[in-house]
Image (spheres, coloured by chain):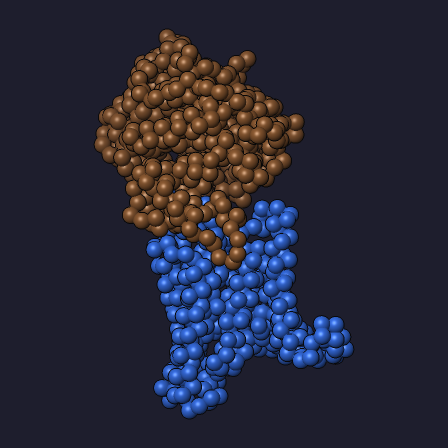
Chain colours: A blue, B brown
Amino acid sequence: MTITTLLAWVVAAVTFGTVIMYGCLGETLNERAGGLNLGTPGIMMLGGIASLTGAYFYETSTTNPNAFISVIISLVCCVVVSALGGLLYGLLTITFRANQNVTGLTLTIFGTGIANFFGGSLVKLSGGLGQISVSMTSNAFKATIPFISKRLGIFSNLLFNYGWLTYLALALAIVLHLFFFKTRTGLNLRAVGENPATADASGIDVIKYKYLACCLGAAISGMGGLFYVMDYAKGTWANDSGIETLGWLAVALVIFTSWKPKNATWGAYLFGFCYWIYLYVPTPVNVFLMKTFGLNKSTYLQNLYKMIPYLVTIIVLVLVSAKKRHHDRAPESLGVAYFREER
Amino acid sequence: MEKESAVELRNISKSFGKVIANDNVSFDINKYEILALLGENGSGKTTIMNMLAGIYYPDSGQISVNGKVVSISDPKVAYELGIGMVHQHYKLIDVFTAYENIVLGLKEKNKDARKEILDICLKYGFEIDLDMHVYEMSVSQKQTLEIVKVLYRGAEILILDEPTSVLTPQEIAKLFNVIRNMRDDGKAIVIISHKLNEVLDISNKVVVLRKGKFIAEVDTSKTDERQLTELMVGEKIELDIHRDEPIDLIKRLEVKNLTVLNEEGRKALDDVSFEAFGGEILGIAGISGCGQKELLEAVAGLQQIEPGASIIYTSPENTEEELVGKSPRQIRELGVHLSFVPEDRLGMGLVGNMGMIENMMLKDYSTGHGLFVQTKAPKSLASTVKTELSVDTPSLNTPVRRLSGGNVQKVLVGREISLAPTVLMTAYAVRGLDINTSYTIYNLLNTQKKKGVAVIYVGEDLDVLLALCDRILILCSGKVNGIVDARNTNKEEIGLLMTNLKGGN
C-alpha cells in the first residue's frame, strides 16, 4: 500500500467519520436522558435536505449570493428542521408515551421519505439529475484553515485539510463530554436517564430535560446530514440511502462509545475506516477471502466488509455486559417512558 | 420537656379505587420524639407517610407542619417543608457516587457542600465515603446515604419506612444509635415497623393502625408486646367459612433444610422444614417478605436452592420423587401446581393481553401435536371454568387484562385446579377481592381439600387463616417460627410468632 492510498483512506474515513460523529453525539445526548431515538438516520436525512434546500433557494434567488449568509441559512435550516423532527419524537414518546422503538423506526422511514421527496423535486427544479448544485455554499463549508492546511506537507493533508465542520464535531464531542461529567446540569440530565423517579423526587424537571435533550440531540444529529450533503456530496443530492446507512452506524457508535462522547472522537473515525476498508484491502487478501468463502462477486465481499463496524459494536456490547462495568452500561431507564403517578 | 408538635395529621382519608387505605386518621408527630407507626401489612402505614412525603395526595383531611396548614402536592414541597422520607426501596442512582446522589437536583452550587455533608455525618455518627459509587455499597451503606441525603436537604421531620428489614443486628444497633442522636438534636422521627421488639426498643410513642384506621396511641414506656399485638391484630372476627375435619391424611410433600438466598446474598429462607398432607389446608402466615414467595417458588422449581435441602414428593402411586433439581415443568407434570397471585395479579401466571382460551393453553401447549395449536380442549376448559366459577367476562376471547381483579383470580385458580393437581399452592389468592368472591375462592380450596389435594395457602388475613386452614406454619425472617393447629390457637399467638423470632431476633 502506497502512502497515497493510505492518505486517501484516511481522508475518506475522516469524512464519513465526521458524519457518523455528529449523528452519534446527538443521539448520545438524547439517550443520556433516556430517549432511544432510532429515528436518528431519518433526522440526519431531514437535516441534509433542509440545509440543501435552504442553500439552493438562497443561491438561486439572489443575484450576488454571499457565502457567509448562505452558510448561516443552510445551518439554521438544518438545525431547525432536525430539531422539529426531534420534537415530533419527543411529543410521541415523552408526552404520549408511545413505544420508543416503533416511533424511532417510523421516524426514520418518514425522514427518508420526506428527504427523498424534496430531493427529487430539487433535482427536477434544477433541470435533471446531477444538475442541482450549491457549489458556493458547499465550498464555504469545505473551507480549510488558511496557511496551516498547506504548509506542513503530508501532515497538512493528513490533519488540516478538512472542512471546518470536521473540527467543530471534535470540539462538540469534548464539550458534550465535559457537560455530561463535569457540570451540575449534566449530572441532572444523566440522573433523568438513569432513574427519572429519583430525579423527579430530587426536584429536577424530568419532562423539560427530556424534551430539551431530544430536540437539541436531533439538531446535532441533523448536522451529520448537512456535512454529508455539503462536504462529501459537494452540495448535490442523490436519492440513495447514503446518509441513512451512516445514520445506523451512528446509532451503533453510541453503544460502541458506551455513551461517552470522548470515545466518539476516535470511534467515529474507526467506523469510517471500517466502512471504506473494502476499497483499500490489498487484492491478494481479497482474492484469498473470496476463495475461502466461495464468493464469486467482489460486491459480496464488500458487503461482508461493511458489516465490520456492527460486528465490533456487538463485541463491545458483549464485553461490557460480561465484565459488569457499571460505567460503560446504557442509562438504566433508556427506552422507558416516565409517568410520575407510577412511582 | 414540653412536647412541641412538628406535624399534625387531622382526619386524613385516602382511597385507591374501591380500596380504602386510610380512613379518618389523626395523630401528631412531635419534635424530640421517635414515633413508631405499627400495623400489619396493608394497614395503611406507608400510605399515610407517603402523603407527608408528597407522593400521594390525601382525599380529605388536613396536614399542618409547624402549626401551619399545608398542601403537599409533590416531593419538592415536602423537601421545602423539611420533611424527608427514606423509602423501603431506595431512590438512588447506581452509577453516581454518594456525593453526586446527595447534591442531585440542587439549584445553587455550594462550594462547602462536601464539608457540610461530613459535618452532618460527624454530628450524628454516620460513616460514609462520599466518592463511593452506589453499586459498590452494601444495603446498610445505601440506607445511610439516603438518610444523609435527606438531612443535607434540611429535613427536620424524618420518616423511615421499615428501616431495619434488610439490616443485620449489628447494623440495626448502629442505626438506632444515630436515630437517637437525631432525636436528641430536636428532630421529629417516624419509624414504620411491624417488629415489636424494635418498636419497644427505639420509640417514645407508638401509633397503631389497623385496616387503614387509627386504633390507638400509647406511650412506649407504658406498654408491652402483648398489648401491642392485641392492638395490631384486633378482635377475632367470626368468619363463616365451612371447614371439614381433614380425613385420610396422606403425606405429599416433605421439605427438609430448605435454604434460599435472595439477590443480595442474604438468606430469604433459612433451614425450613415442614410436611404437607393431602386432605388438609396448610396455611402460611408471616409479615410480607419473610420468605413466603421464595418458599412456594422453591417447591415449584423456580428458585436456586442451596445444597443440603431435600423436597420429597409422594405421588398418588406411592412413589417418592426428589423435587430439588427438577425443572418447573417436570415438577408441574408430577402434579405440584403453583397458582401464585402477586401484587400486580397479572405478573405471574396469566398473560394480560390474551383471552381466557389462550391463557388456558399456556400450561399445556407442549402436549399438542402437529403444526397448529389445538384450540378445542382449551376452549371447552375455558367455558367450564367460566360457568363453574361464574367468571364475568364478555367473551372467552376478551383479554383477561380487562377483567376485574376477582375474575382474573378465578381464571388463574380455575386453570390450576382444572389440571387436577395433587399439591396446590396459592399465594394471596384473595388479595383485593370483595367478600363474596373471596368466599368462592375459599370454597374452591375446600373442595380441593375434600378431593385429597394438599393445599398450601399463603395468606395475609389472620382471621381467614384461622378459619380456613387446618394447620398454620408461621414464617419469621425466613425461618419456621412454629407450626400450630389452627383450631387451637388465636390471633395473638400467631401475631407474636410472626413478629418475634424464637430464640432472639
- When the figure is inspected, residue A34 is found, relative to residue B132, above or below; the finding is below
- When the figure is inspected, residue A50 is found, relative to residue B320, above or below; the finding is below
- Which residue extends farthest top? B222
Task: Determine the residue positioned at 58% across, 39% down.
Answer: B330
- Percent x, y for residue B231? 34, 15
Q: From where the camera sits, is residue A180 visible?
A: yes
Please name whichever residue, A79 or B488, is drawn nearer the observer in this view of the structure.
B488
Task: Determine the residue positioned at 42% across, 81% down.
Answer: A119
- Percent x, y for residue A274? 64, 69
Task: Determine the residue positioned at 64% across, 49% down.
Answer: A322
Q: Quadrant of residue B487?
A: top left
- When the figure is inspected, residue A7 is found, relative to residue A247, above or below; the finding is below
Left or right of B162 on screen, residue B310: right
- Percent x, y for residue B171? 54, 23
- Percent x, y for residue A222? 46, 69
Please name whichever residue, B270 or B396, is drawn nearer the observer in this view of the structure.
B396
Please name whichever residue, A243 or B15, is drawn nearer the observer in this view of the structure.
B15
Please name whichever residue, B414 or B37, is drawn nearer the observer in this view of the structure.
B414
Left or right of A17 on screen, residue B483: left
Considering the image in quadrants, where does the C terminus of chain A appear?
top left
- Which residue extends farthest front? B317
Considering the image in quadrants, where does the N terminus of chain A appear?
bottom right
Task: Determine the residue positioned at 51% across, 51% down.
Answer: B368
Q: Quadrant of residue B156?
A: top left
Q: How many marks?
A: 0
- When the figure is inspected, residue A225 is found, relative to residue B449, above or below; the finding is below
Q: From where the camera sits, is residue B123 visible?
A: no
